[in-house]
Structures are given as structure tokens and as C-alpha cells.
Amino acid sequence: MLSTIELFVNRLDSVESVLPYEYTAFDFCSEKTMKRPSENLGQVLFGERIEPSPYKFEFKKPAVCQKVCTRTYDTSSPSDKAKLDFLKKGMLLNYQHHWIVDNMPVTWCYDVEDGQKFCNPGFPIGCYVTEGGRAKDACVVNSNFKEKDAFYIFNHVDITIHYHIVEHEQLGARLVAAKIEPKSYENPNDDNPDCAGGPKFLKNKYTGVFKIPYTYSVNFVEDKSIRWASRWDYILESMPHTNIQWFSIMNSLVIVLFLSGMVAMIMLRTLHKDIARYNQMDSVEDAQEEFGWKLVHGDVFRPPRKGMLLSVFLGSGTQIFIMTFVTLFFACLGFLSPANRGALMTCAVVLWVLLGTPAGYVAARLYKSFGGEKWKTNVLLTAFLCPGVVFADFFVMNLILWGEGSSAAMPFGTLVAILALWFCISVPLTFIGAYFGFKKAGIEHPVRTNQIPRQIPEQSFYTKPLPGIVMGGILPFGCIFIQLFFILNSIWSHQMYYMFGFLFLVFIILVITCSEATILLCYFHLCAEDYHWQWRSFLTSGFTAVYFLVYAIHYFFSKLQITGLASTILYFGYTMIMALIFFLFTGTIGFFACFWFVTKIYSVVKVD
């Protein structure tokens, strides 16, 4: 029995543009009769649009130069001219096909320097040779592509399916790889193509009738060396990242060890000495000579200014922290691998919605301990402020994508579904969390707060708020910037990201670094008799997000070749969302580390 192998097509994207387009937007041969596979929320958010294709073949039945369809364009017809211009634009910006066979990406493998093979999970529509005769992008692969100011169309594909026979089970054979080689043929005989003749090209200024015949050949190769479970490996191995990852982990660990050493030294030596000395002061004369952080014990738990906003930020930050931790943990266990398309994003969104309760609880509990009484405002801000800013940004980006006709534009139904998740699940859960937070007694502080605030002495340059905040973000950013490069590559350069084990390690390192850097600076400020630690601890580690933003701008200008106003606005719009989430996430870590530290040191000191 011969079984039919179905080939699905995904959206087309380009490293030179942020706008992905559906397969049908380019007027390729399409399959009208079959139903589209349904996409999950993550796929819709990332603009994936998987559709059936007219490329169908029987297993172990090779085919040579099979005709799929012929597209005819008459440049005198405005609609045909628009289609042809769009196809030319796609080739100019190096848009790439993404095809899928048996949930595996169809890859185009070619030789790169040092005799290595690079397997790209996409292949180009075509390419362009400039007026000066310079071959751009994929045109360099063929020396026959030399016609000046012309577009070469890859209208033929050689598909090779690798399989192995399963002997013990009833399944028969399993597909372990699908490779493709795009080619360009003139095919003068339209009805009976022979895949002969020179390459198919379209002069930039061509007028008249232009035909593009689309054909394919398919071949089957038995490959006993690849096991079905490890069939993705050949794609991932051709991405030369692992060595750099180990270097990045080592680099981060050195920073952590340095910081941990500093914190341990302060904790054990300085603090131990301080506490011992403070607790020995029995006489009144000694007490008169208090100095350092002991002096501010009556003010250190004084509620901060703008306590409402801080508590709301910390509530949202807690929500993001738990969401990130659980998502990365599942990704490490292999539940969210690249084979489960869109699973990572779906998991993150669902978790965020369900984690409204911790957000409401943390915000309410802290707001109560700051002495706040406007609990209704607090709950509403926790439920709507940060998610509202993210949604507003996302909505504006979506309008731009709609205007450009991109496949990444979310359908109206999905937008309504996300709003329903937010209003019907996340908001009520936030209210429940806040109810329990306000019901509980405020956090007990180890020392009483004085009636009259103490005057803060003149600070040196290093203990002023701004220099401390700016310095505090450097070390956490130093831990993550190499990992950040790969994450940005996977988002904007459409490379696969699969190293979640590394990412989880870096996540743990980031948490430790943010905590330790904030504790260190918090201790120095308390020694300088400055007791406004709450906002400062949040902003110190939160400032890492500003470095992230600077790095994203540098990455845009140095690594990406993005052109066009819409793409640029989209890049910075999405980057702002990432920076805001990262700011809340790192700031929350810094605040809670500092809160723990301050509570700890003042609870072991005898206060008169």
C-alpha cells in the first residue's frame, strides 16, 4: 500500500523585514480544496499560518519534473502587475519559504566555509542581480545567474525524503529528514515541462506576458543512521552556538562568584562585627555614638513615596517572575521543543493569565504594609496598568501589521479571545488575590518607625541615587548579554532557539546577580545613613532593562538589515514591550532581595 505524503506550507519571512506574509500572498500554486490545520494561540501570535500545498507524492515513488501549475502575468493588467511587483519585492528582500513534511521543517543544506554544511529551515523565492552585475543573496549559488538588473525565480524544487524502515513495529517506515534544493528552469514547453534550458529570469523593466511554470522532483533515500527521536539534530547541529554558550555561562559564573564573595565578606565580616559591637553597647555614652546603618533603624521601614505605584509594579513583577520560571522549567523538560509549534508562547500566555492571584496578593500585602488605604485603586491598577500598557502597544503594532497585510496581524477573533482571557480570568483572579492580601495583617517589621523622619546627611557622589542605580544594572546585564544575542536572533533572524537548559541556567544566574548587586548597594547606602531603599532597590536591578534597550538598539543597527518604516516601528514597538516586562521582572527580584536583607539585619540588632 502506497501512502501519500503531504507537504504543508507556512508563512514566508525575511531577515530584511519584520513583516511575514502568508503563502497565498505571493500567488504561488495553492491548494484550494483541503482544510487548513488549526493553529494554537502561540502560532497565531507569532504569525504562523500553515496551509496545505499542491505538492503531493506517494511514498517510495520517485517523480521527475512534475508540473504543479503555471502562473501567467500580463503587465498591462493592473492586478497582474501588482502581483508580479509583490513577487519581485519578495525576491528583493530575500523572503524565504518554510515548508513542513511530517511536522519536520524541509531544509536547504549548502556548504559554507571550513567544509561545513549549513542546513537552513527555509529557502528563498528567488534572488536579484543588480544593475552593476552583483549577485545578491541566493544568486551567488549559481554562476549562470549573470543577467543584469534581473530577478531569478526558483520555480523548481528537488525534494529528497530520507526515511528508515522500522523492523519491529507495524508502522513500516518513518521519515527522518526532508531536504530541498531550489532551482530555476526556463521550461519552454509549458504543458510538458522537461526541467531543461537556462534559468528562469524576469528583467526588472519587463513588459508583456510572463509565464512562470512551477515544477518539482522527488527522490527517496533510505537512511539507517538517523533515529526518529533524533531527527531534528542535523538542523540544530549546523547552528554553531554551543561553544559560545559555555563561554557565556562561564563568564556569568565568574561574575556571580565575584559578587557572592563580596556579599559573603560583607555579611560575615562587616555585619558580624557591626552587630556584635552594637549589641555590646550597654552604656548610654556608647549609644550616643551610634554610627552606620544602626543609626537609621527608626526610619528604615518608613513607607516609600508613591507606595501605590511600587506595590503595583511588584505585583506585576511577581506574576512575570513565576510565569518565566515555570515556562523555562517546562521548556527544560522538553515539553516546549521547536517540534511543538507555538507551544512556548501558548504556555507563557496561559500561565500569565492564571497567575493573576499572586499578583493581586503581593500588591495588596505590600500596599497595606506601606500604610496605604485606597485598596480599590490598588487592585484596579494591579489588574490593568502593566497589562494595559502591553496590550495598547501590541494593539498599535497589530494595526500596522493589518495595514501592511501581513500574516502576523492577529485576526479580530483572537484579539477578542485575548481580551476575554484578560477580563474574564486574569482580572477576577487578581481581585481574589488582593482580597486575601488585604485580609491578612500587614507585614511585621522588626523595628519601630519613629514619628519624625530623620534628616539624611549630604551624600558622596557614589552613594547618591542615580550613580548607584546606573552601576547596579551593569553586572546582571553582563550575565545575560550573550544569551540575549541568541534570543534576539531567534526572534528577528528566524533562527531556531532550542537551548532552554542554558537559558534556565542563565535565568538562575540572573536572579542571583540581581539580588546580590542590589544587596551590596543597599548596604552601602544604609551605611551612608540613607534609608530610602525601597524604590532604589527596585530601580537598581530594574535598570538592567535600560541596558537591554540600548543593546537592542545596537543589535538593530549592527546585526539586522531591516528596511522600511513599518518594520522599524514594529521592531522598536515589540522591543519596548520586552523591555517593560524585563524591567518589572528584574526590579521585583532586586526589591525582594533587599527587603529580605534589611529585615534580616535589623532583626538581629538590639534596639532600645
Image (cartoon, rainbow, N blue to C red):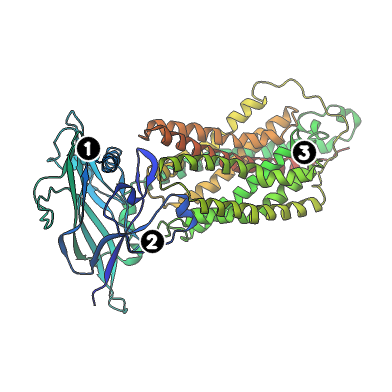
Query: In the image, is 504 to the left or to the right of 602?
Result: left
Residue 449 has which mark?
A: none
The secondary element bearing badge 2 is classed as loop
Query: In the image, is 333 to the left or to the right of 124?
Result: right
Give the alpha-carbon distance from disc 1 to disc 3, as whole Å. Answer: 73 Å
Q: Amino acid at mark 1?
A: Tyr
User: In the image, what residue occupies the spot 24% across and 51% down?
Assistant: 109
The residue at which mark 2 appears reads as: 36
Judged from this view, the residue extending furthest toward the front is 77
Residue 275 has which mark?
A: 3
In this view, the mark in front (1 or 3): 1
Q: Amino acid at mark 3?
A: Ile
Residue 128 has which mark?
A: 1
Q: Amino acid at mark 2?
A: Arg
Give the alpha-carbon distance from disc 1 to disc 2, as whole Å. Answer: 32 Å
Q: Is residue 433 above or below residue 176?
A: above
Marks 1,2: beta carbons within 8 A = no
